[in-house]
Amino acid sequence: MIIDVHGHYTTAPKALEDWRNRQIAGIKDPAARPKVNELKISDDELRESIINNQLKKMQERGSDLTIFSPRASFMAHHIGDFNVSSTWAAICNELCARVSQLFPDSFIGAAMLPQSPGVDPKTCIPELEKCVKQYGFVGINLNPDPSGGHWTSPPLSDRQWYPIYEKMVELDIPAMIHVSTSCNACFHTTGAHYLNADTTAFMQCLTSDLFKDFPTLKFLIPHGGGAVRGIDPETGFPYDDTKRYIEASTILSAQHKHKVYEGNARRVFSRLDAALKAKGK
């Protein structure tokens, strides 16, 4: 089995983006603010958005299961207040849960948190618990910079974040450290802000005693070069077609490849491992 631990719902039906644009407009004009029940997306629309996109790519590249979370650049925690983020996160997480229910052998969820600049992270716990306990999600995405490139939050080692870590340890789930859209003109979102944030988060952990306080805390730090998109001019294949490079390796044993493809993911995502074992996998 090949497990991709880092998938986002980047191809959601356009109705989602349209509803979000109305929500953003409603920040300044409450009369324009849409109700949650005004967003109508059918199961057939979800199926179409997945079959022709993510699932098609998975089949082409030979992966079996994707840990699936809302589109990262759409999280945009810097927009609006906590209520805006909370409503938006709940909508996006529910869509990922529905996709996972429609394609249970191909997708399993990870949650977006309703973070907001200057708001205590513990306000995210109800959404986190709902996603894990009700939807069966196996992880979360944690934004170390809800301000969108201005870095107004304390470092990840600060005790302000501890309520999230305590809940992660309690539920035995990892967090992928993942920023969202940059609203700082100095930082391109995927080409700079993502990579800057990953390095920053790593150094915040390295230079602190965080893991002395939480020895079983689990983080994933992504985008190891993958945020710089493009096609390999020598082969014509995308740089992010990871399996192709692993299969071509002459130094990885079969055991090493198993760890890369499946073993490491099951070790870090304990709830994923349990879900797969319940299916006899």
Image (cartoon, rainbow, N blue to C red):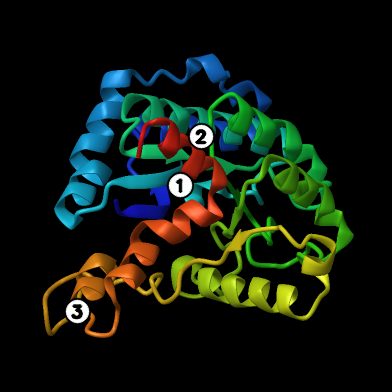
Q: Amino acid at mark 3?
A: Asp
Q: Nearer the viewer, residue 256 or 186?
A: 256
Q: Which residue is mark 3?
A: 232
Could you tell me which residue is drawn at 61 percent across and 53 percent down?
Answer: 175
Q: Amino acid at mark 1?
A: Arg
Q: Where does residue 9 sit, x and y in percent of width and height?
A: 39, 43
Q: Where does residue 187 sit, x and y in percent of width and height?
A: 55, 73
Q: Nearer the viewer, residue 203 or 260?
A: 260
Between discs 3 and 2, the one toward the N terminus: 2
Q: Where does residue 253 sit, x and y in percent of width and height?
A: 29, 76
Tell me, for residue 71, which label it has, or none: 1
Residue 246 position by quadrant: bottom left
Tell me, for residue 92, which label it has, or none: 2
Could you tell me which residue is drawn at 46 percent across and 20 percent down?
Answer: 39
Residue 241 position by quadrant: bottom left
Q: In the rendered image of this protein, does residue 279 appear above or below residue 228?
A: above
Could you tell me which residue is drawn at 53 percent across and 50 percent down?
Answer: 269
**Helix, strand or loop under label 2:** helix
Question: Is 146 on the left or on the right of 39, as rendered?
Answer: right
Could you tell me which residue is drawn at 55 percent across and 71 percent down?
Answer: 193
